[in-house]
Image (cartoon, rainbow, N blue to C red):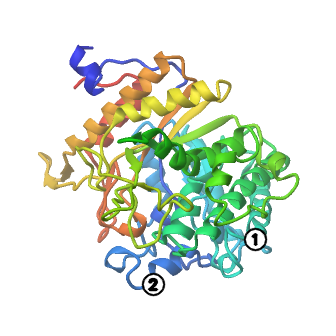
Amino acid sequence: MSDDSRDDYRGSGLQFPDGFVWGSATAAYQVEGAAAEDGRGPSIWDTFSRTPGKVWAGDTGDVAADLYHRLEADLDLMASLGLGAYRFSVAWPRVQPTGRGPVNRAGLDFYSRLVDGLLARGIRPVATLYHWDLPQPLEDAGGWPVRATAEAFEEYAGVLGSALGDRVATWTTLNEPWCSAYLGYGSGAHAPGRTEPAAALAAVHHLNLAHGLAVRALRETSTGTPEMSVTLNMHVFRGVGDGAAEAVRMVDGLANRVFLQPMLVGGYPQDVLDDTAALTDWSFVRDGDAETVRQPLDVLGVNYYSTTRVRLWDGAGTRERADGHKDVGGSPWPGVDERVEFPASPGPYTDMGWNIDPAGLEEVLRHLSRTYPDQALMVTENGAAFPDEVVTGPDGRPAVHDADRVDYLRRHVTACHRALAAGVDLRGYVVWSLLDNFEWGYGYAKRFGIVRVDYDTQERVVKDSGRWFADLARTGLLPGA
């Protein structure tokens, strides 16, 4: 590797160890469709996406990528890409339409067919219990800010453990609880669209509690030997200006440590409790909760896309809010939002407006390894949206030459290789996303897939990035430039 490639993370010819897992990921509401079929109940994202003004162009996940009806073909597609693992999420309202009580057998059967289909093709099933689609009746009863939702999640986890725990390779309790708590109940950018700072902090705890309760329930009900995990979207902050360290401390507490510490060590960081004391006394934390939340994990999932600049705000002028998240008026930084601001990060950028900084991925992997040296890690999401152009290939069929996405993936996979070389116990890399899909508040305006979806015809077209990733998955060797 040349000095230049070391600087820009454009490695080639890098060999990954045997057993390193290469996979791709999706989430139920983003790809399944069949929103009102076979007994599925409504989720908060059904409600939110149908509320005028909440999602770009009024898009919904009613059809999405129609994976529910195209399961066998999409499983064959995964096999053709040489995937070693497929990370999918289970739609809670498809399994328990009201969030508690009666189980929808048709919903469970769908996921059973999915798991069996993966195993038949030699692909590891990595099942996420919660990727943001809370059953609407649970939100009507208070949602994540109330303890009963965590207790319902424990019941739901037991249902899945009993039904699929003999075959699932890895259980992931939650995907990005930061988003569920702060974007759902603080900023209002995600479902259910509430802007209640104290409720967002209560949601943080009840999501943490739900994680611990679910791990216990899954261990009790799974008859196989699945690994236990959770996936966190790790924020990498770049402090700027006078007081940079203090600015980073505040936002790192809310973004990272308020999940990492209770899950891996126990209890909440005192500085976070102090920073948010004007909003809540944290009395929703009960005796025994710390022990429940802290459950041994086989792997910690790391989602990474970009870095974020932060500095202390002097209160003068317009506060900069380029934190990478859709701004709809509320704040995802309860307790510190009036003390910090987020200047724009230097480019280049993806179509989401996120800066491209592969060094941040190496940095966070090495930091986690130093801080929690006995904890195995896996990159469970990494990828990029770009404005793909469809052209006609030599065979007369549609083609997508997404060189910018290939370059993004090359640089971040190189970051993973460097982390491994530094001694990080990194078990695998999962690209986001397998398919173009419903990108939450951005609807169908942003495309992350290594496979293009024509939303009018549901035709799948493997992009150049998909072919590139397939070579990597089959050989464990980073392809040449």
Q: Nearer the viewer, residue 363 or 393?
A: 363
Q: Is residue 240 visible?
A: yes
Q: Nearer the viewer, mark 2 or mark 1?
A: 2
Tag 2 residue: 51
Between the residue at mark 2 and the residue at mark 1, the CA separation in whole angstroms equals 28 Å
Q: Residues within 10 Å of mark 1 (few under 14, many from 20)?
A: some
Q: Is residue 170 above or below residue 370?
A: below
| Residue drawn at x 46%, y 63% as measured from the top left | 30
Which dot marks residue 103? Answer: 1
Query: For the residue marked with disc 2, what is the amino acid?
Result: Thr
Q: Nearer the viewer, residue 300 or 103?
A: 300
- Residue 153 in the figure: left or right of residue 368: right
State which tag comes first along the sequence, 2 or 1: 2
Q: Nearer the viewer, residue 418 or 248?
A: 248
Residue 348 image offset from top left, x and y in percent: 22, 44
Residue 361 image offset from top left, x and y in percent: 43, 34
Q: Is residue 190 above or below residue 220?
A: below
Which dot marks residue 310? Answer: none
Q: Quadrant of residue 477?
A: top left
Q: Nearer the viewer, residue 324 or 172?
A: 324
Q: Secondary structure at mark 2?
A: loop
Query: For the residue marked with disc 1, what is the amino acid?
Result: Val
- Residue 3 in the figure: left or right of residue 80: left
Residue 54 image offset from top left, x and y in percent: 41, 78
Placement of the C terminus among the 4 image quadrants:
top left
Q: Is residue 387 above or below residue 370?
A: below
| Residue drawn at x 77%, y 73% as measured from the top left | 100
Q: Is residue 433 visible?
A: no
Residue 88 image offset from top left, x and y in percent: 55, 52
| Residue drawn at x 48%, y 43% as measured from the top left | 248
| Residue drawn at x 34%, y 62% as measured from the top left | 316
